[in-house]
Image: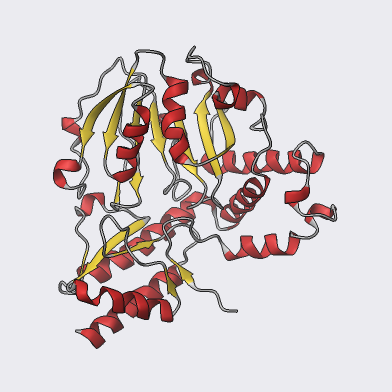
């Protein structure tokens, strides 16, 4: 069986070395004679693995000691509601920066739990560029400021961390976490669904400043409280043992690749190659995003004639280039270039794009 080059936006590519190790350990994990999925999460083997995964993640991101690291069930969408439940009290307001589909969805899910102030929005520009920082209407009394550093659907990315003063900055980093070095101390809370740069779907990683854990007195079930999860080492209930294990293998793989400095260099090179191919195609391919806001992780592009879309997708898949169809809301194409997508995959894609333009010109 031959592997394809996987450009899926999520669930996305997982490093082949990680998959091969998981395959080797499937029937006999850590000398136990059973798979990790059959182990008690209260057993020493699993607890040691979980501790190592947290250690490796902390070292990758240089997470300060005054931050807790949680491995939770569910995805980022659940946190759109759970974050205001935990960080905002009754009657509090929170600022939201809307830069695309996912930040807009965060606004809609937060509404029942906090007074939402849309402090800035890229919607008037069809989310083709980021809202100018000078136009943000931030409230210094807000419970937090929420933004999405990278929008997987619209293909825009913040290339710096916004300064929001003393208000805690909350970031949905599902699609760009671990893609380059990050100053965690600039944030109050970082959360990320695992299915793009960490591992399989169903797991969420959260990094939260400890002083925020007991912020709200809102009445809610224990299972929804971040403080309870932290106090129980993310095992208030049975965790996603398989996802946690694969995340740990991915963290080890990232260390072996040279850490986040090396990954940042690779990701910039991959994105630069694909954008250069689009820009140099004399309009055959187009990317509509303002160059200053182009995403390194999710590259949108259209063909000069939409009638060629079906042929492009059929022929690309036939040569092993998977999942290039754009999101249904926007059409066109999208190539997601997460950590597990190597430069060779982008080289294969750009060569195919050139060949396709020649044959269908």
Quarter of the C terminus within the rendering: bottom left
x and y percentages locating residue 193 in the rendered image = 49, 44
Question: Where 346 falls versus 34 (above or below)?
Answer: below
Q: Residue at x 62, y 64 (%)?
A: 17
Could you say where residue 64 lies in the image, as x and y percent from the top left? Answer: 54, 30
Name the residue located 48 percent from the left edge and 58 percent from the top edge.
12
Which residue is farthest bottom?
A: 359
Q: Residue at x 32, y 58 (%)?
A: 327
User: Is 99 on the left-hand or right-hand side of 114?
Assistant: left
In screen coordinates, is 177 left or right of 305?
right
Q: Nearer the viewer, residue 158 or 287?
A: 287
Q: Quadrant of residue 121?
A: top left
The image's colour scheme reads secondary structure
Residue 188 in sight here = no
Q: Nearer the viewer, residue 100 or 296?
A: 100
Describe residue 315's horizontal placement relative to residue 320 as left or right: left
Q: Position of residue 194 (x, y in %)?
A: 52, 47
| 299 in relation to 304, above or below | above
In the image, 309 versus 290, the foreground residue is: 309
Label count reads: 0
Q: Is residue 293 visible?
A: yes
Image quadrant occupied by the N terminus: bottom right
Q: Position of residue 183 (x, y in %)?
A: 44, 36
């Amino acid at each position: 069986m031959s592997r394809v080059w996987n450009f899926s936006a999520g669930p996305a590519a997982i490093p082949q070395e990680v998959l091969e190790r998981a395959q080797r350990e499937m029937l006999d994990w850590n000398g136990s004679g059973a798979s990790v999925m059959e182990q008690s999460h209260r057993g020493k083997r699993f607890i040691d693995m979980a501790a190592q995964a947290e250690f490796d993640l902390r070292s990758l991101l240089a997470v300060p000691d005054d931050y807790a690291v949680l491995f939770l069930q569910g995805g980022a969408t659940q946190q759109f509601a759970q974050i205001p439940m935990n960080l905002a009290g009754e009657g509090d307001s929170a600022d939201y920066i809307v830069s695309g589909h996912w930040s807009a969805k965060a606004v809609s899910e937060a509404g029942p739990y906090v007074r939402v102030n849309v402090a800035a929005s890229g919607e008037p520009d069809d989310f083709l560029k980021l809202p100018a920082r000078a136009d943000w209407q931030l409230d210094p009394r807000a419970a937090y400021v929420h933004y999405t550093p990278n929008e997987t659907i619209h293909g825009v990315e913040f290339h710096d961390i916004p300064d929001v003063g003393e208000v805690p900055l909350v970031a949905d980093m599902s699609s760009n976490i671990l893609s380059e070095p990050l100053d965690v101390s600039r944030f109050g809370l970082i959360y990320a669904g695992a299915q793009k740069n960490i591992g399989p779907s169903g797991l969420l990683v959260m990094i939260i400043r400890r002083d925020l854990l007991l912020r709200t007195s809102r009445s809610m079930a224990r299972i929804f409280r971040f403080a309870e999860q932290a106090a129980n080492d993310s095992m208030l209930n049975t965790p996603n043992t398989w996802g946690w294990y694969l995340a740990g293998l991915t963290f080890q793989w990232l260390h072996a690749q040279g850490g986040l400095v090396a990954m940042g260099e690779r990701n910039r090179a991959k994105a630069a190659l694909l954008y250069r191919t689009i820009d140099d195609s004399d309009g055959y391919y187009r990317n509509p995003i303002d160059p200053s806001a182009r995403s390194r992780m999710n590259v949108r592009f259209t063909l000069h004639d939409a009638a060629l879309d079906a042929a492009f997708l059929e022929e690309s898949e036939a040569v092993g280039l998977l999942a290039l169809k754009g999101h249904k809301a926007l059409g066109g194409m999208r190539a997601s270039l997460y950590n597990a997508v190597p430069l060779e995959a982008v080289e294969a894609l750009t060569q195919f794009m050139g060949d396709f333009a020649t044959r269908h010109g």
